[in-house]
Amino acid sequence: MPRIITVSSGKGGVGKTTFAVNFALTLSRVAPTVLVDLDTGTSSIRNTLETPVRKDLYHFFRKGQRLADCVTQLDPKLDPQGLFSNFSFVAAPMHSIDEITNWSDTSRWKLVHAINELPAEFVILDLRAGLDTNVIDFLPLSNSGILVFTPHHPAATLAAGDIVKSLLFRKLRFIFSTDSPFFRQHGALANQHRMVNELLNQVEDVYEDGLPNLDAFLQDLLMSLGNNPYLETIANVVHSFGVYFVLNMFDGVEESYDTAVRPFVDYLKNGLSAHLKLTNLGWVIKDDAIHSANCSRRPILLQPSEQKKAPAPLDPVMRELANIESSVFGLPEPKDVTPRISPTRDELLNISDRSPLDRQLEILNTMYHTEGSMQVRNNFAYITHRVLHVVRSLPADSFGQSQLLTPLEIFHKVFPDLPG
Ligand SMILES: Nc1ncnc2c1ncn2[C@@H]1O[C@H](COP(=O)(O)OP(=O)(O)OP(=O)(O)O)[C@@H](O)[C@H]1O
Ligand SMILES: [Mg+2]
């Protein structure tokens, strides 16, 4: 089963492309990986990889070529030893072409289906900045994919929180729309249905201070209606939602905690829910060598490394992947992410305002004391290792997606249990 993993950030310039390229390279050492440039206005991936591109998204959209025929392998001069032969990428067109930059619905769903058909174990999607439908429609339904933010752009941290908010509300609106199986089953309760949708609007609207977040909303609903199907459904959606993030341009535990992690967690806790499942996948250090590598169109992981000059039997990335097993820390156990069928009244009302933040500092500190935590190759090996751990140990919809879905498919495939 392929796993499609999005890399997004809300705001621009935080290092999505830098992360996506080097992460996909590292993952490709483990299994076939295709990186797709969905930032079709700026063609950033082809600008980062000095490799001739014969076919790109132009050929897919304009010339009717299969997406699988529009992938490009690394030029051998970037990978003389063939270490990254399992890596390939789909480039965006060389220059902006309006209909390819701003997809119509038809083009977007055509691309969605073609991405699902790519022959790879991992497909990494480098998304554009912003929060429009060309970003949101590629993101998962039950988790955030990988969010990238950095201590150097505080506003971008809140934008990453806004992605989580959009995804949660998108899912709730799917469930409570009048086309949904849920409505067909419970539509007789028309007044309750209207009330729930109105209250959701209030929570989403930050200018209304009546209901600050989904936890308050659930408490309100419980007080006014008692146990009811809405309560259970919303609690399951919120309590099982996974938020995964990577800190780019990391410059120390305290700085990252104060300027990125804490504001991010506070924002989610205060504006959405204290019950979201947060996983810090790791960080990438701030290093001019990373930037210079991008500018020379040979990403940092394709630069000759110090160790490689020595007669080392094992590539350092692979060695780190193998060694780091014991340092995985702070990942939820599989049982943690299984949606709770029926949250108890106490669980809904008793919200600890300490829980999500407490562990984040502890996790940062533990990662910091991991050997090699300030070396960029090890950063990517560490993140990749944690991602593989999550992919292998949690159910498929807990992290990334096994398939991108159109809205119609979401009703059929994601909510089959709701009788319709
Ligand atoms: N860890 C890092 N250390 C130093 N420089 C970095 C690092 N990560 C990214 N950069 C630099 O920061 C700039 C922005 O990075 P990048 O283009 O990857 O961000 P982005 O989020 O993809 O931007 P956009 O939203 O425009 O697509 C680039 O000049 C890149 O070389
Ligand atoms: Mg980019």
Image (cartoon, helix red, strand yellow):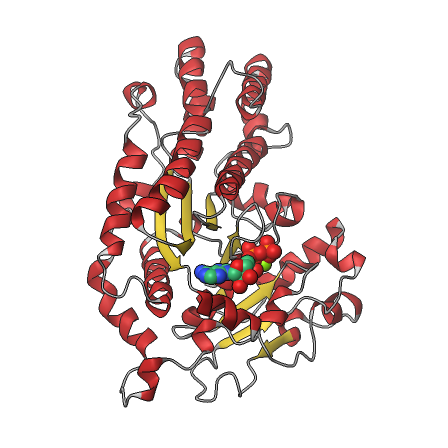
Considering every residue shown, the one lying at the far left of the view is 326
Whether residue 237 is visible here, answered yes or no, is yes
Identify the residue shown where x is 31% and y is 55%: 393
Quarter in which the C terminus is drawn: top right
The image quadrant that residue 390 belongs to is: bottom left
Q: Residue 176 location in percent, x, y? A: 57, 28
Residue sitting at x 55%, y 80%? 74
Q: How far across and how far down the image is residue 219, in percent? A: 40, 16
- State the residue in front, 73 or 119: 73
Residue drawn at (36%, 30%), measured in percent from left and top?
A: 274
Left or right, 251 with reference to 50: left
Left or right? Give the position of 29 relative to 160.
left
As displayed, is residue 179 above or below residue 397? above
Q: Relative to residue 194, is residue 406 depicted above or below?
A: below
Observer able to see residue 126? no
Q: In which quarter of the image is ligand 2?
A: bottom right
In the rendered picture of this protein, how many numbered marks are placed on residues? 0
Q: Residue 304, image x and y in percent?
A: 42, 82
User: Where's the N terminus, which quadrant?
Assistant: bottom left
The residue at 34%/84% (across/down) is 308
Residue found at the very far top of the displayed protein: 224
Q: In this image, 400 relative to 118: left or right?
A: left
Residue 224 versus residue 328: which sits nearer the camera?
A: 328
Q: Position of residue 250 (x, y in %)?
A: 38, 54
